[in-house]
Image (cartoon, rainbow, N blue to C red):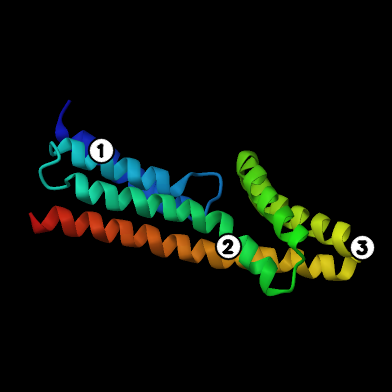
C-alpha cells in the first residue's frame, strides 16, 4: 500500500482523536496515540523513536487519569462528602461504557446518590452533582491541552530529525 494512504489514515486518526476530547463517545487520546504510532511505523520509527512514543503513551495515560479525577475534584470543591466523591468516581467509570449519555449523567447521579446516602439532603446533593459536572468540563479542557501537547511532541520529534 502506498505510504501516502497510511499517512492519510494516521492524520485522520489524530484529527478524529482531537475531536474526541470533546465528544465523549470517542476515545480521543487513544485515537491520537494510534495515529501517531501509525505515523512512527510508516517511517520505520526513524523520526519518531521509542522514547517519543513512551512520552506520548504517558500523556495518553494522563488523559485517562484526568478524565476520572476531574469530576472528583469538582465534587470535592463544592464540599462533597467522601461517599459522594466515591459515587462520582464510580459514575464516571461506569458512564464511560454508555457513551455520551453515560459520561454526562452517570457521574452526576453517582455524586448525588452518594451525597444523599451520606447526608440525606437533596439540595446539597444537587450542588455536589453540579460541582461534578463543572469538574468534568474543566477536565475536558485539560484533556484537550494534553492532546495538543501530544501533537506538539509528535510534530517536533518528526521535524527535528
Disc 1 target residue: 38
Residue 118 position within the rendered picture, expressed as x and y whole percent measured from the top left: 85, 61
**In the rendered structure, which disc, 2 or 1, sits on the residue that comes first in sequence?**
1
Badge 2, how many Cα within 10 Å: few under 14, some, many 20+? many
Quadrant, the N terminus: top left
Taking the image as shown, residue 17 lies to the left or right of residue 157, namely: right
Q: Residue at x 12, y 57 (%)?
A: 159
Q: Earlier in the sequence, mark 2 or mark 3?
A: 2
Q: Residue furthest top?
A: 1
* Residue shown at 92% from the left, 63% from the top: 120
Q: Which residue is the site of mark 3?
A: 120
38 above or below 127?
above
**What residue did someone put label 2 on?**
70
At which x and y percent is residue 119? 88, 65
Looking at the rendered structure, the number of numbered marks drawn on it comes to 3
Q: Secondary structure at mark 3?
A: loop
CA gap between label 2 and label 1 equals 30 Å
* In-front residue for pair 85/34: 85
Element under label 2?
helix
Amino acid at each position: 500500500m502506498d505510504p501516502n494512504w497510511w499517512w492519510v489514515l494516521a492524520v485522520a486518526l489524530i484529527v478524529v482523536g482531537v475531536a474526541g476530547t470533546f465528544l465523549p463517545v470517542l476515545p480521543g487520546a487513544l485515537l491520537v496515540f494510534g495515529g501517531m504510532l501509525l505515523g512512527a511505523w510508516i517511517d520505520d520509527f526513524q523520526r519518531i523513536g521509542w522514547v517519543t512514543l513512551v512520552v506520548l503513551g504517558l500523556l495518553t495515560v494522563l488523559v485517562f487519569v484526568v478524565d476520572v479525577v476531574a469530576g472528583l475534584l469538582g465534587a470535592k470543591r463544592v464540599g462533597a462528602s467522601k461517599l459522594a466523591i466515591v459515587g462520582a468516581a464510580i459514575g464516571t467509570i461506569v458512564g464511560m461504557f454508555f457513551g455520551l449519555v453515560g459520561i454526562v449523567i452517570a457521574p452526576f447521579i453517582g455524586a448525588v446518590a452518594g451525597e444523599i446516602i451520606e447526608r440525606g439532603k437533596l439540595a446539597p446533593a444537587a450542588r455536589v452533582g453540579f460541582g461534578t459536572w463543572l469538574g468534568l468540563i474543566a477536565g475536558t479542557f485539560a484533556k484537550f491541552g494534553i492532546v495538543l501537547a501530544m501533537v506538539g511532541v509528535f510534530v517536533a520529534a518528526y521535524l527535528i530529525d
